Structure formats: C-alpha cells, structure tokens
Amino acid sequence: MTWGPFLPGLDPAERKARLRSLRALVKVMSGSRGADVEFAILRAEISGDDADMLGEAEATFGRLGAIDQRRVLASFASLHSPNLKVIHG
C-alpha cells in the first residue's frame, strides 16, 4: 500500500476522506466498468483501517482498465496535491 488512501499511518479521518473521493472519481470516470472497484473501495471505507479490506480495494483498483486508472489517478492527484492554491474571491 503505497499511495493515496492506501498509505500506511494515515489519520483515519483522512483515509476515509481519500477513499470517498477515490470512490467518487471511479464512479464518475469509469461508470459501470468500475463497479467492482467502487464496491471494494466502499467496503474499505466502511471497515476503517482494516488492512485486508484496504489491500483488496487497492488490488481491485489495479485491475481497472489502464485508461480509467490514468484518468482517476490524475484527478485524484490533482485533488490531493499539496500545491493547490486557494483562490479567495
């Protein structure tokens, strides 16, 4: 487990937030092709820090098609970038 919500040592609330955003991106960007991934991520989100569920979600994401993976990962990285600039209006 080496990226995003699968990083070891994340605060439980941060892990849940990252899992939720990853699940939303999978749903929006891959539709029915990502249904299994979406369900695995939901199970991991509900289970908290259960290593088996997190591992299953990460492995299931790895089986998503390459184009879908790239789209989801690019958006996820952009969303969680520490270099985001906040625009005050």
Image (tube, rainbow, N blue to C red):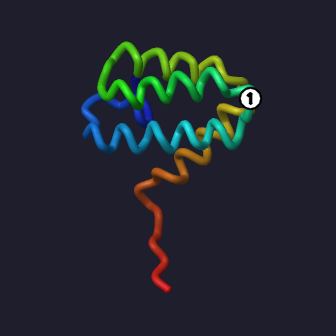
User: Residue 26 appears at what percent x and percent y?
Assistant: 63, 36
Q: Across the whole image, how many numbered discs are drawn on residues?
A: 1
Measured along the vertical axis of the image, is residue 48 above or below residue 76? above
Q: Is residue 8 left or right of residue 3?
A: left
Give the residue number, with chain letter if any, for mark 1.
Answer: 32
User: Residue 74 appears at what percent x and percent y?
Assistant: 61, 44
- Looking at the image, the residue that sits furthest to the bottom is 89
User: Residue 15 appears at what percent x and percent y?
Assistant: 35, 38
Measured along the vertical axis of the image, is residue 50 above or below residue 46? above
**Residue at figure coordinates x 68%, y 43% from the top left:** 28
Q: Amino acid at mark 1?
A: Ser
User: Residue 6 appears at what percent x and percent y?
Assistant: 40, 29
Secondary structure beneath label 1: helix
**Residue at figure coordinates x 30%, y 43% from the top left:** 13
Q: Which quadrant of the view contains residue 52?
A: top left
**Residue at figure coordinates x 71%, y 33% from the top left:** 68
Of the 4 image quadrants, the one containing the N terminus is: top left
Q: Which quadrant of the view contains residue 72?
A: top right
Q: Which quadrant of the view contains residue 76?
A: top right
Q: Is residue 7 left or right of residue 74?
A: left
Binning the other alpha carbons within 10 Å of mark 1 as few (below 14), some (14 to 19) or many (20 upward) gives few
**Residue at figure coordinates x 60%, y 48% from the top left:** 75
Measured along the vertical axis of the image, is residue 27 above or below residue 88? above
